[in-house]
Every structure is written in C-alpha cells, then in structure tokens.
Amino acid sequence: MMLLPPTTEMYRALVERDASFEGLFYACVRTTGIFCRPTCHARKPKPENVEFAGTIQEALHRGYRPCQLCEPMSAGPAAPNWLAPLLDEIKRDPDLKLRDQDLRARGLDPVQVRRAFKRGFGMTFQAYQRACRLGTAMKALHGGARTLDAGLDAGFDSDSGFREAFAKVFGDAPGRARDTALLVASWIETPLGPMLAIAGDEGLELLEFVDRRALETELRELGRKWKRAIVPGDHAILDRTAAQLSEYFAGARRAFDIPLKLQGSPFQIAAWQALCDIPYGETRSYADMARRVGSPGAVRAIGRANGQNRLCVVVPCHRVIQADGSLCGYGGGRWRKQWLLDHERGARVRPTV
Ligand SMILES: [Zn+2]
C-alpha cells in the first residue's frame, strides 16, 4: 500500500480518465455509495462528493460497494471468470461467511480463491469478506456528524440493515445490553489509512487501523469480556485523539496526552505501560521490554502482549523490534511499522546532530 497522490491531482486524473492512475487510487462517490476506477466512464462526481481510497480494501471498509460500470472488483486478467459467481454471491450478501468447505461445495478450490484474491485485489479472500462486513458497519462512522447526529434515534433506527450490521460487528446496542458501560466509536483519517477509535468517559479504549486482521476479535472482546456496548457518535476524548494524531502525523507531536483505559491482565497492562515509556524516535528489543517489566524470561509473553495492544500508535508497540534490528510483525502491517519508525527518526534528525 502506498500513500495517496495529492487530492487535486487525483481529481484531475478522475475527470480526465487518466489511465496512468489505474490502481493508484479508487474514487468513492458519497452520493451513490459506490467506488470506481479513475478511468470509469460514469459521469464524474463533484469534488465535494468524492473521497479517495488507496486500495479496494479501504474503499470497502468505508462502506462503499464496487461500481457496476467500471467493475473495480471483477475486470482485468487478475479476476478470472470462474470467480465471478462467487463475487456476485458476496455482493448480494456481504455478511455471508464462507469457509473452505463452503467454497469446495461451490466447486472452488480455496487455495486458488485465496491466490486470485490476493493477486487481483491485494488482499486475501478472508480480508475481503471482513472488509465487506466491517464496511457496512463502519459506514455511519466515517460518514461524519450528519449521520451520527441522528445517532440512535432516526438514522440508526430507520436503517435497520445498518443497525443489524453494526450490532453484528460492535455487539448489541444499548437497551438490550444492560449493566454495560457505553462506549462511543468514531472514524479517524490518517496518512496511513483510516483508524477506528473507541472511547468512554474513562479514556480511550481502542485505536486500530481499520484493516487490522484482529479488529473484529478485539471488538467482540470489548463487548463480551469487558462488558462494553459500542455506539457511533462523538466524544471529547475522540476529538482529542483525532487532533493529537493529526499533529503526530504532521511531525508536530512526539508524546500523546490522552487518558487511556487499559484493560487486560496485570502482565499485559505492565507491558503496555512500559511501551509508553519508550521515547519517541527510539526502539527497544523484546528482551529489553521483558527486563523492564521485571520478567527477563518472559520475552515471548512480551511479544504476545505487544500483539494484543489495542491502542495502536498512542501505545507505541511499533517501537519494539528484534535484537538484530529487524522489524518482525506488526498488527497494522509491517509497512506501517516501518513508516512510523522512519517518521519518528526523520523528525528527530536536527542540523545540530
Ligand atoms: Zn465506475
């Protein structure tokens, strides 16, 4: 995944149907809820009605569906004919969860399906399904205040499809979920792709890139294990998070000042707190972190706790690397970890050094 070209440049390419931008961005049309290739022959939207996504996955996460004219999800040699019936089926029912045996029952080879998706759309079949499911639920979140003002009243109720999709991903809406603290979810744009932020009065509880594989599991955990009901909306802590993230990505902020609600085992919490002590622009090894929490032998457990961090970027798990300097895994994708470390290193370099 790459960062997007400047918006004016993308809009020009869209209007001129510039084929050299093919694959670099997708145009998401707010008024119709569909996404297009730059070269689509449909009438072009006004600038204020279009937003741009770097990948198909991102467009799906924003709740857009593929255009039937330029077919971003099916044209080209990358999407073979045998895949078409499956794509149609999922398009009709985005919540459809197909396992390997379901694919075999349709005469499809799961390995081939996985490969064709990865090659054609830059994501696995599982990631595609996840993107469709999440996308429906995320629609209102990234749509901004207009939709959210309606909140649980008009907007939420009148669109029962959305309500259902939202409940499926975020757990039961309040009313049915008694004795649960209320959390508010919102969508935050960053140069590395959109993030989902969830906060309550006690602090920020989740901040993740929307395409993170573990996101659905984390949301289920918040709901069931930690007894939190999640609704779309605005919250002062979320505003603060968005503002500080924007400063961070602009290179104007090195530390976050946001109340965090860490929920986990005492070991996990100690591990996450230790992460917050790693200064901006520096890195530590897993062994360093294990010593830091007083369990030098617990290197693997430290790795696991890092992977379970739900507060991406603000609890800087990206600052932990292998002893030999290699990056190893990152929930938000290794390219993001590299980007964050480069970003922090770059901002640190001063002429006096
Ligand atoms: Zn189109």
Image: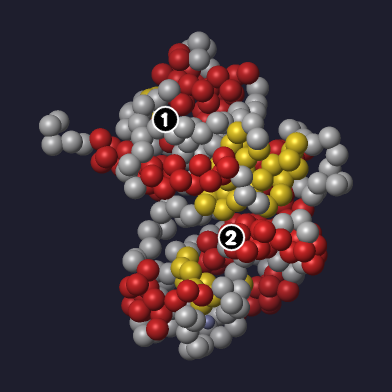
Disc 2 secondary structure class:
loop
Question: What amino acid is at disc 1?
Answer: Val
The quadrant of the picture occupied by the N terminus is bottom left
**Which tag, 1 or 2, sits closer to the chain's start?**
2
Q: Residue sitting at 32 percent across and 33 percent down?
A: 281
Q: Nearer the viewer, residue 55 or 196?
A: 196
Corner quadrant of residue 308:
top right
In the picture, measured across the screen, residue 27 lies left or right of residue 97, that is left
Question: What amino acid is at disc 2?
Answer: Gly
Question: Around disc 1, counting alpha carbons within 10 Å, would you say few (fewer than 14), some (14 to 19), or many (20 or more)?
Answer: many
In the picture, measured across the screen, residue 40 lies left or right of residue 11, that is right
Q: Is mark 1 within 8 Å of ligand 1?
A: no
Q: Residue sitting at 68 percent across and 52 percent down?
A: 232
Q: Is residue 74 above or below residue 292?
A: below
| Residue at mark 2 | 144
Which percent across, then down, holds residue 180? Answer: 79, 36
Q: Nearer the viewer, residue 249 or 79?
A: 249
Q: Is residue 88 above or below residue 184?
A: below
Question: Around disc 2, counting alpha carbons within 10 Å, would you say few (fewer than 14), some (14 to 19), or many (20 or more)?
Answer: some
Residue 309 in view, yes or no: yes
Corner quadrant of residue 138:
bottom right
The quadrant of the picture occupied by the C terminus is top left
| Residue at mark 1 | 320
Q: CA distance from mark 1 to mark 2?
A: 34 Å
Q: Residue sitting at 18 percent across and 36 percent down?
A: 350
Which percent across, then down, holds residue 214? Answer: 61, 44
Which percent across, then down, holds residue 240? Answer: 51, 42
Q: Residue sitting at 75 percent across and 36 percent down?
A: 181
**Colour pattern of the rendering:** secondary structure
Which percent across, then down, holds residue 202? Answer: 64, 31
Q: Nearer the viewer, residue 77 or 46?
A: 46
